[in-house]
Amino acid sequence: MIDLVDECGKDLASCGYETVELGKYDITCSKLFIDTDGKAKKYGFDKGHYYILNAPLILGLPDEHFKLLKGEIKERLKVIYKENKVKKDSRLLFVGIGNPDVVCDSFGTEVISKIDIKPFEKDNKIFKISPNTFSNTGINAYEITRLLVEAFDISVVVLFDSLATTNLHRLGTSIQFNDAGLTPGSALNKFGMPINKESLNVPCISVGVPFMISAGDISKNCSKDLILAEKDVGEKVDYLSSLVAEVFNEML
């Protein structure tokens, strides 16, 4: 499977796919709305609103990017919140997908560690969890999320995960967010259970950043099973997890 919707290799124009330049540092934003089952099947992605911010100079100019990207993400998340009727009194469950012991797969858990909650407040409506990976726990992230949604009467699930890309230049420079949910490990295996509105009966918003690439996407002489990451991946995970966590903290 492909994680980034615009890497599916198909013509997305019929879904209204478009990319706009945001005016500074070569940052662009692409958007796509998959609104029918037919389109979902054709493109291999669940129905929903998709946004992808691309910031190729993100670590070269970190201070200049932080405030700018935070504002851009927030404006588009407001649209997704409105489409899914997310309100101030909604009961939110934040879920950090991934393996905290593998740096390139730790984006989700890093975001969760930086999300602020107030568990001792009497009317607390914000919850968070990092279920780790199936290979470490023997429990599918979907099952853990489903049980928590039911137990705590959750209104909206927000998921964070590291993604895979087919393009070296997008490692740690693209941020995809949507209201279609996600399938943990979808780009690396085929046994993940989808976490989305259809499977949980509540809106599922996801935010992901590609930090991994298959060696086979770099060279035809390499195995698709060999997964690579950049040597500075830790720096990018820390920066982008802080960026995304701050956006959601300000929107709580």
Image (cartoon, rainbow, N blue to C red):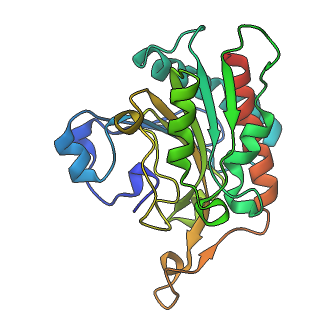
The correct choice, above or below, for 231 with respect to 162 in the image is below
Depicted 244 relative to depicted 8: above or below:
above
Q: Quadrant of the N terminus?
A: bottom left
Most foreground residue, 224 or 19? 224
Q: In the displayed image of the protein, which residue is found farthest to the bottom?
A: 221
Point out residue 3 in the picture as x, y percentages from the top left corner.
46, 55
User: In this view of the protein, which residue sits in the foreground, 229 or 205?
Assistant: 205
Indicate left or right for 202 with 151 as reference.
Answer: left
Q: Position of residue 33 (x, y in %)?
A: 32, 34
Q: Residue at x 77, y 62 (%)?
A: 101
Q: Quadrant of residue 232?
A: bottom right
- Name the residue rendered at 82%, 54% in the picture: 235
Q: Residue 99: percent from the left, percent from the top?
A: 69, 58
In this orientation, does residue 96 appear? Answer: yes
Q: Is residue 58 visible?
A: no
Residue at 51% in and 84% down: 219
Foreground pick, 72 / 233? 233
Q: Is residue 94 above or below residue 227?
A: above
Residue situated in front as seen by the camera: 147 or 234? 147
- Image quarter where the C terminus lies is top right
Q: Quadrant of residue 54?
A: top right
